[in-house]
Amino acid sequence: MSGFEGFGKILIIAGSVLTGVGLFFAFGGHIPFLGKLPGDILIKKGGVSFYFPIITCVLLSVGLTLIVNFVVRFMNR
């Protein structure tokens, strides 16, 4: 039975990740500060607009890095 312990951990983590992604898609539009942080770039000229949420990307990157590090440490136990 010890061969299935690793597979069980993978299923738990995959389920948690899918739940998190689903919650983000369901409620992501309702988070008021997401995509409108100071430092996000918005340029409007005429009928063209360019938007790049650089600070939002940095914060998401840091958050995902912490989550991935936690998952990797959990898998190594």
Image (cartoon, grey):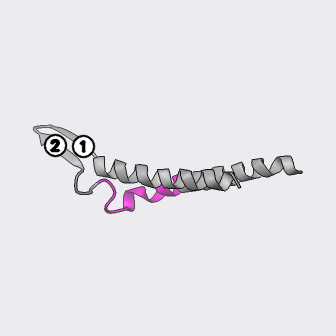
- Judging by the rendered image, the residue that carries numbered circle 2 is 43
Note whether residue 8 is visible. Answer: yes
User: Which SS type dominates the magenta stretch?
Assistant: helix
Residue plotted at (33% across, 52% down): 56
For the residue pair 31 and 76, the one nearer the viewer reads as: 76
Q: What is the magenta range? A: 21-35
**Residue 70 drawn at (x, y percent):** 57, 56
| Residue shown at 45% from the left, 55% from the top | 63
Q: Are marks 1 and 2 in contact (CB under 8 Å)?
A: yes
Residue beneath the point at 47% across and 55% down: 24
In the image, what residue type sits under mark 2? Ile
Residue on which disc 1 sits:
51
Distance CA(mark 1)–CA(mark 2)? 6 Å
- Looking at the image, is mark 1 or mark 2 earlier in the sequence? 2
Q: Nearer the viewer, residue 56 or 19?
A: 56
User: Dot 1, crowdedness within 10 Å: few (<14), some or many (≥20)?
Assistant: few
Residue 70 is left or right of residue 35, and the answer is right
**Is 5 displayed left or right of 31 in the figure?**
right
